[in-house]
Image: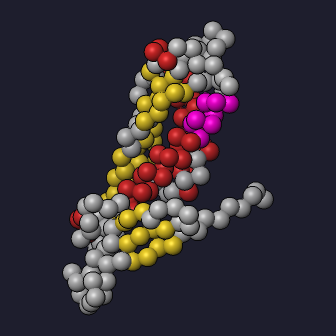
Amino acid sequence: MGILHTYEVTLRWTGARGVGTTSYTAYSRDHEVVVEGKPPLLGSADPAFRGDPTRYTPEELLVAALAQCHMLWFLHLAAADGVVVVGYTDAPQGRMRVEAAGHGQFTDVVLRPCVTLGRPDRGDGRPVTDEELAVLHARSREHCFIARSVNFPVRHLPAPLRVDRSAGDVVAP
């Protein structure tokens, strides 16, 4: 059996408006997600469900968590393989279907990572290719704790790799 990690948060509803849930339209969906020692994360429902559009929704946070987890594993595996990444962005998209009765579920999430390398090779003349980065993305998916925990597909559509030649030779510390 592996090491067990525990994560604790406090969820605090802030939208009672003095009347609570006297009706579906009486209360706000506003809440705070608090992790000890960190600033509160202001949350609400999706605006389609009477939420505040200026706050984070659980659906957005799920998509963000998948992208974050994938990126962190990708950076780890790239470093272990001698691939020098100097930039990483993603524009993930999650799709959720809501049934007539109000039940819903995510149908898929697509990650769109864009990786920028500090040099076109590993420092030994062996070039880094899009195919090799695709393998790193696949390995990242296999390791990502969040992606392994969801019951819908998480796909990857990586952009072609970029090399930042303006950075000069990036050397290991």
25 or 43, nearer to the observer: 43
Could you say where residue 6 lies in the image, as x and y percent from the top left? 65, 65
Asked if residue 52 is positioned above or below residue 63 in the image, the reply reads below
In magenta, the rendered stretch is: 73-80
Residue 120 visible in the snapshot:
no
**Residue at the limit of the structure toward the top, as seen here:** 125
Residue 75 lies in the magenta stretch: yes
Which quadrant of the figure contains the C terminus?
top right
Q: Position of residue 138 (x, y in %)?
A: 56, 36
Residue 41's place in the image compared with 109, above or below, is below
Name the quadrant containing residue 48: bottom left
Magenta segment: does it hold 23? no
Q: Residue furthest right?
A: 1
- Answer with left or right where residue 146 lies relative to residue 46: right
Residue 70 in view, yes or no: yes
Percent position (x, y) of residue 113?
44, 35
Rendered residue at 31%/83% (across/down): 16
Residue at the outermost left position: 25
Name which residue lies at 47% across and 33% down: 88
Q: Residue at x 53, y 50 (%)?
A: 147
Query: Please, what is the dominant secondary structure of the magenta stretch?
Result: helix
Location of residue 114 by image quarter: top left
The front one of 159 and 89 is 89
| Residue 12 higher or lower than 138, as above or below | below
